[in-house]
Amino acid sequence: MKVDAKTSARLGAIRQHGTAAELAVRAALNGLGIRFRVQNRDLPGSPDIANRSRRWAIFVHGCFWHRHEGCKRTTTPTRNREFWLAKFETNVARDARVVDELRQRAYAVLVVWECETRQSDALQEILAEFFASQVVSAESRSPRSRSRSRT
């Protein structure tokens, strides 16, 4: 089912990068001293924020578009409902496939939902927890973390 030209133009005007939610995540990462890149088109799904050398990626998902389960922002328009249901189903399937592809490449992946970016303390906690688990898993893989006692 198609969308009329007026709706198509309105949807085309929606910002995809540099959203308020994405800027909030970037600010929180900067506050934690985490280094990252935002131009990641060479990675599956073009993560919003990533660090290739540390092998992690963060997607900042809008609750409406990516169907955040249980969130009040996850509504479905009543006009042209079949189109929207198909669109949302495609988005969710693509998101799952992209996360799987990144994990197969040994990337740690975090999805931050738009509604989670509204409270900076909670966002900082989510990010700190994610990176704390990354340090532990990276140390267990790194040959440098093993003790080097010379006798």
Image (spheres, helix red, strand yellow):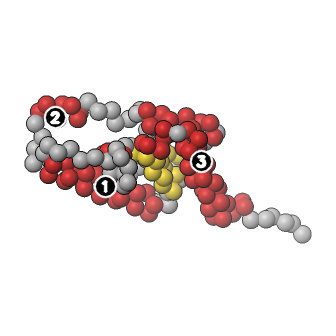
Give 53 or 134, whichever is nearer the viewer. Answer: 134
Instruction: State left or right for residue 29 relative to residue 60.
Output: right
Q: Quadrant of residue 8?
A: top left
Q: Is residue 119 left or right of residue 93?
A: right
Check disc 3 and report the residue beneath it.
Answer: 125
Q: Is residue 60 above or below residue 146?
A: above
Q: Secondary structure at mark 2?
A: helix
| Residue 86 x/y as whole percent | 19, 53
Amino acid identity at mark 2:
Thr
The disc, 3 or 2, on the residue closer to the chain's N-terminal end is: 2
* Vertical arrangement, residue 5 with respect to residue 49, above or below: above
Element marked by disc 1: helix
Based on the displayed image, in which of its 4 quarters is residue 6 positioned? top left
Dot 3 falls on a residue whose secondary structure is helix
Residue sitting nearer the eye, 12 or 120: 120
Q: Is residue 40 visible?
A: no
Marks 1, 3: nearer the viewer: 3
What's under tag 3, amino acid-wise? Answer: Glu
**Residue tagged 1:** 92
Please tell me which residue lies in front, 77 or 31: 77
